[in-house]
Amino acid sequence: DIQMTQSPSFLSASVGDRVTITCRASQDISNYLAWYQQKPGRAPKVLIYAASTLQSGVPSRFSGSGSGTEFTLTITSLQPEDFATYYCQQLRNYPPWTFGQGTKVEV
Amino acid sequence: QVRLVESGGGLVKPGGSLRLSCATSGFTFSDYYMSWVRQAPGKGLEWVSYISSSGSYTYYADSVKGRFTISRDNAKNSLYLQMNSLRAEDTAVYFCARAYYYDRPMDNWGQGTLVTVSS
């Protein structure tokens, strides 16, 4: 099974900051990676798929990059509504469809 | 408007059974692959099960294989998860989610239903 490891697990930031979250796959997954945002008590929401394609309706301050085993999610100019937990998910080799352990972005 | 609404969660004793449902609307259900994903209290997301658009193919996480059964009724636009031999570690919020294919993101999710396994 492919393991997905995110870093950091917790990130303290302020409004207006540039934030970068890293996701590493235990083997090559090409660009088969999605990023999700989850707020407390809510369902996850897809932000980015195919490593760098922005889902419709997602603000352009979110961007994704990477290929192979290392990926990043970047939020330029963090907004109050961006404080949430972010998960990566590999979509290359399945089952299982593995998620990272999550990165909580907090004040 | 795409909607996915889970139901059927609740409190059940260890060893018991529960059947979750996911009612959908606003899209052509039979075109989509459907999944169950769970989240234990205070923990991350864990994929549980996947079913193909026709229902012919199903996949399970090792943690639930042999105990859970995913199914769908395309005529009723509904997804199901039959959960047997429940354990304390199955306690979680269970989300249903859709994807256009296995290698596509889960682009719409329900609000989740809480399953608590406790004596």
Image: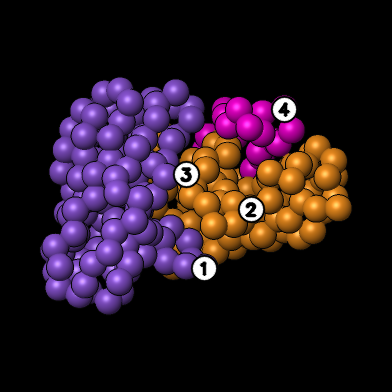
Chain colours: A purple, B orange
**In the picture, residue A15 is in which quadrant?**
bottom left
Magenta region, residue range: B52-72
Few, some or many C-alpha atoms within 10 Å of disc 3 (few <14, some 14-19, many ≥20)? some
What kind of element bears circle 4? Answer: loop
What kind of element bears circle 3? Answer: loop
Q: Is residue B74 left or right of residue A98?
A: right
| Picture layout, residue B32 above or below residue A39 | above
Dominant secondary structure of the magenta stretch?
loop
Is residue A57 in view?
no
Mark 3 residue type: Tyr
The residue to which callout 3 is attached is B32
Q: Are marks 2 and 1 in contact (CB under 8 Å)?
A: no
In the rendered image, residue B3, in percent from the top left (x then y), is placed at: 51, 64
Q: Is residue A42 left or right of residue B70?
A: left
The residue to which callout 1 is attached is A41
Distance from disc 4 to disc 1, alpha carbons, whole Å, reads 30 Å
Which residue is rendered at x = 32% and y = 43% of the image? A6
Q: Which callout, 4 or 1, points to the residue nearer the camera?
A: 1
The residue to which callout 2 is attached is B92
Few, some or many C-alpha atoms within 10 Å of disc 4 (few <14, some 14-19, many ≥20)? few
**In the picture, residue A5 is in which quadrant?**
top left
Mark 2 residue type: Ala
Q: Is residue B11 left or right of residue A106?
A: right
The residue to which callout 4 is attached is B66
The answer to whether dots 4 and 3 both sit on one chain is yes
